[in-house]
Each structure stands twice: as C-alpha cells, then as structure tokens.
Image (cartoon, rainbow, N blue to C red):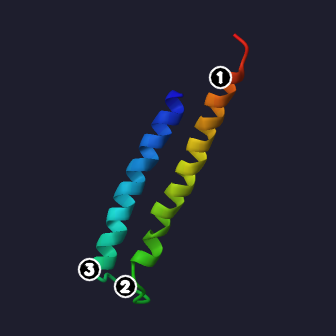
Amino acid sequence: MITLAATTLMFSLVLYYGARVTYSEWYWEETTPGLGNPSWIYTIWMPILCVAILMRVLGRGWAVLIRRRGAPQ
C-alpha cells in the first residue's frame, strides 16, 4: 500500500506540473525552433499518459483492497 500511495503521489505531481507546462506553452503560443510547430503538441502527452498510469495504479490498489477483504483471517 505504501508503494501504491507513493506512486499515486508522484504521478499526481507529474500530472499537475506537466499540465501547467503544457498550458503555459499553449497560452504563450510557443513554437519549436526547427519546424515551428506548437510546443504544446509534444508536451500534452505527459499529463494524458499520467492520467492513464494513475488509473492503472488506482485500479491495482482497488484490486489489492478487494483481495484483502475477501481473504480468510
């Protein structure tokens, strides 16, 4: 459970700060130096994938809790 809590905390922080960076790049209309593409296109994947990882971690935590409840004592 400690590992699940630490993983949730870490990816929640990455999600928060990744979303802030992506928003900042979108707001200020930053572009890449070489191609001139919007920078947020490349950084938007960090928060999106963090959500996917957090869903997996929380699903795993839920499964562990259910298994502990059903285990004979």
N-terminal of the pair, mark 1 or mark 3, is 3
Mark 2 is on which residue type?
Pro
Within 10 Å of disc 1 (Cα), the crowding (few <14, some 14-19, many 20+) is few
Drawn side of residue 51 relative to residue 32, left or right: right
All told, the count of numbered labels is: 3
Pick the quarter of the image with the N terminus.
Answer: top right
What label does residue 69 carry, if any? 1
List x then y, in percent, for residue 56.
60, 48
Residue at 46% across, 74% down: 42
Mark with earlier residue (3, 2): 3
Above or below residue 4? Residue 32 is: below
Residue identifier under label 3 = 28
Q: Secondary structure at mark 1?
A: helix
Counting from the top left corner in percent of width and height, residue 24 is at 29, 71
Give the image location of residue 12, x and y in percent: 42, 49
Q: Tags 2 and 1 in contact by the CB under 8 Å rule?
A: no
Which is in the foreground here, disc 3 or disc 2?
A: 3
